[in-house]
Amino acid sequence: MPIQAILSDVHANAVALRAVLDDCEAQRVDEVVCLGDIVGYGPDPIECLDLVRERCAWTLCGNHDVALFLPVPVGFNKIAREALEWHRSVLEPNVWFGRKRKQERWNWLRTLEPVREEQDVLYVHASPRDPLMEYIEEGDVADMGFGPPQKIVEIFERIPRLCFCGHSHRPGVVTDDYLWFKPEQLPHASFQAPHNRRTLVNVGSVGQPRDQNPQSCYVLFDRETGDVTFRRVAYDVAAAQARFQKHARLHPRTWQRLETGV
């Protein structure tokens, strides 16, 4: 599969997901994969889960996905927690009346793994050091005059050659000399990952971008050449916001931020 589309952080935003999947089809990718957080924040958990199951060759679990199966979601603010509680209420099968499709969806979500490795490429939701929860931010690579921070050194020690992650909703490339490049800093938003050096790629977010760009973000990866290309996809934000506003248990912040990508 030479051309792989890598998605992450859909967050139950079906309008954004459908736009990205349409773009994947236009790019004639060989397979689509997802790094997790299909649920959380948004109005369309069922639709997004069904789309990901149908269209993605494989999927990892994210911290929001795992939280559905915890008695109390840990590490989430009130806005995220309330959305997860609502998602659980619509997704979890009733012990007496759970329909087959609902049960299959729930069981599939429960069995997702947080890590996948294919040859010298590692896929995680969050970080090689903590696949579910650890954020990797631009500030983590900053040399304050004492060499690279221990955090990023330990993260890179766990990368075979190339690692793709999501979680922070902020796309970028980190090289093994600990430099962070935003997509707009790369020629044509592309980067060729060397075969003899380690590279970390955050693929951004489909449903909740947070890099001050409201367009959905995902990555195309050419397995043969090592080329990594960031794709930005415009979608109907107003239509997505209208879906959010139909659900009282979704805080206004979850849809207001879609306009600006913050």
Image: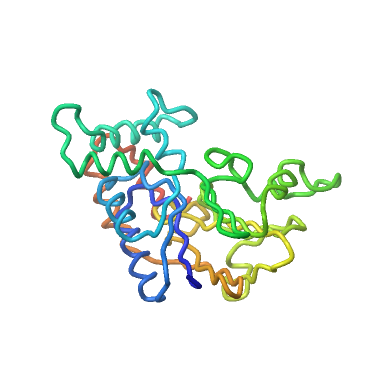
Q: Name the residue located 34 percent from the left edge and 63 percent from the top edge.
A: 235
Q: How many marks?
A: 0
Outermost residue on the right side: it is 146
Q: Is residue 155 above or below residue 97?
A: below
Instruction: From the viewer's perspective, tell me whether residue 19 is left or right of residue 230.
Output: left
Q: Name the residue located 40 percent from the left edge and 27 percent from the top edge.
A: 70
Residue 242, percent from left and from top: 24, 51
Query: Which quadrant of the figure has residue 54?
Result: bottom left
Residue 165, percent from left and from top: 55, 52
Q: Name the residue located 41 percent from the left edge and 48 percent from the top edge.
A: 257
Q: Is residue 23 above or below residue 163?
A: below
Q: Name the residue located 55 percent from the left edge and 45 percent from the top edge.
A: 126
Query: Which quadrant of the figure has residue 223?
Result: bottom right
Outermost residue on the left side: it is 97
Instruction: From the viewer's perspective, tell me whether residue 37 is left or right of residue 251.
Output: right
Residue 209, percent from left and from top: 46, 54
